Image (spheres, rainbow, N blue to C red):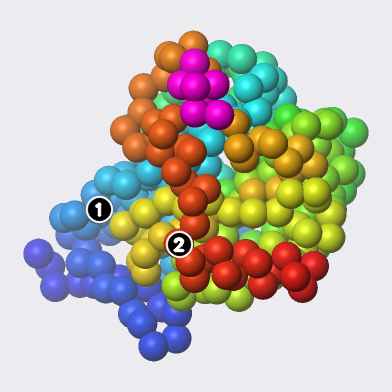
């Protein structure tokens, strides 16, 4: 070990220290600082503006739960939109569904996509070879406000609410997504770790509640996102989508015939059972909405 460390300083009072074996890439793009290094536990680690975005060791947890939960809950998703998602791991999971006819990804920073293509081929190579993948380099908030297209599922794989990602946590953005969702469509968002970032979840739920009939969250435990469960936001006008019976999920999962390492239909159903303090945060957001 070289003795070099990268510190993540997302939360006041807590610093997460990653040992760095090797720096593979380091640059400042038009939008953000970017570093890719290797760590003995997490494999390749991508940080943007000093905040961990993705690691090769545990990306499957976040990407499977963000993609398969809404797609299998919906049951007939053909048009899918990813906002952000520069490493293309989310796209890889979404494209595993043969029923998805077109997957549009709107990412603000082409530098993230270019270097992820070069360095994360282990999980995203199939995306760039898939004709259904449609990459748009643009601000996601602007895109949803202006597009004429309509989507069954929208997944927001954003950075945290700072820098270019801040706009993806605003009510105006969630309204833009609502306007480009087809009837029965669903929005999912990365909403931080509630133990450390409760206000992020409360604020998003408050915004969702003012626009969508159903505003909620589900959880997954992702080692990279330090602090316990990560909350994934859920917003839809179809109030039944987050209560699809287990037998139906099992049947859809079997028909989809996709390989997973975290997602299973019973894990999907259980992910909506929120620990008390997270449920309270969701309630607080709904009441304020
Ligand atoms: N899974 C990660 C997490 O939870 O920390 C997020 C990873 S992904 C690499 C986040 C992506 O969102 C980045 O590639 C960033 O460039 C992109 N992004 C940030 N703001 C954006 C915006 N306004 N429009 C589109 N993409 C944006």
In the rendered image, residue 118, in percent from the top left (x then y), is placed at 40, 38
| Residue 40 x/y as whole percent | 16, 55
> Which residue sits at x=74%, y=49%?
214
* Mark in the foreground, 2 or 1: 2
- The overriding secondary structure of the stretch rendered in magenta is helix
The residue sitting at the left extreme is 1
Q: Please provide the residue range marked out in magenta.
A: 245-251
Q: Is residue 117 above or below residue 289?
A: above
Instruction: Look at mark 2 in the image and give the residue it sits on.
Output: 275
Q: Please report the residue visible at 36 percent of the width from the left and 54 percent of the height from the top.
A: 222
Residue position for label 1: 42
In the rendered image, which quarter contains the C terminus? bottom right
Label 1 Cα neighbours within 10 Å, binned few <14 / some 14-19 / many ≥20? some
Task: Sort mark 2 into few (<14), some (14-19) or many (20+) by Cα contacts within 10 Å.
Answer: few
> For residue 9, which quarter of the picture?
bottom left
Q: Secondary structure at mark 1?
A: loop
**Mark 2 CB in 8 Å range of ligand 1?**
no
Q: In this view of the protein, which residue sits in the foreground, 249 or 165?
A: 249
Residue 28 percent location from the top left of the image: 51, 64
**Total numbered labels:** 2
Task: Name the side, left or right, on which 277 lies relative to 188.
Answer: left
- Dots 2 and 1: beta carbons under 8 Å? no
User: Which secondary structure, mark 2?
Assistant: loop
Q: Name the quarter where the N terminus is drawn.
A: bottom left
| Residue 205 lies in quadrant | bottom right
């Amino acid at each position: 070990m070289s003795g070099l460390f990268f510190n993540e300083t997302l939360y006041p009072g807590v610093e997460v220290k990653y040992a760095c074996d090797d720096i593979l890439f380091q640059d400042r793009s038009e939008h953000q600082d970017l570093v890719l290094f290797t760590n003995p536990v997490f494999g390749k680690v991508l940080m943007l503006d000093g905040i961990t975005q993705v690691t090769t060791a545990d990306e499957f947890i976040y990407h499977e739960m963000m993609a398969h939960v809404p797609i299998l809950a919906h049951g007939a998703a053909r048009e899918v939109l990813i906002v952000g998602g520069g490493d293309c791991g989310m796209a890889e999971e979404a494209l595993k569904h043969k029923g998805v006819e077109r997957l549009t990804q709107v990412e603000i920073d082409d530098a993230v996509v270019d270097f992820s293509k070069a360095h994360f081929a282990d999980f995203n190579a199939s995306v760039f070879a898939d004709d259904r993948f449609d990459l748009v380099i643009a601000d996601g908030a602007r895109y949803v406000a202006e597009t004429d297209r309509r989507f069954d599922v929208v997944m927001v794989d954003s950075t945290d609410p700072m820098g270019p990602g801040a706009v993806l946590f605003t009510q105006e953005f969630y309204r833009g997504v609502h306007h480009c969702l087809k009837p029965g469509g669903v929005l999912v968002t990365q909403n931080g770790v509630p133990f450390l970032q409760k206000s992020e979840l409360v604020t998003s739920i408050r915004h969702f509640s003012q626009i969508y009939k159903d505003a909620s969250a589900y959880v997954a435990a992702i080692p990279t996102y330090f602090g316990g469960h990560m909350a994934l936001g859920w917003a839809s006008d179809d109030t039944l989508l987050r209560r699809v019976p287990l037998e139906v999920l099992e049947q859809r999962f079997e028909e989809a015939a996709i390989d997973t390492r975290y997602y299973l239909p019973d894990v999907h159903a259980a992910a909506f059972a929120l620990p008390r303090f997270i449920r309270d945060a969701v309630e607080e957001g709904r009441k304020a909405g």
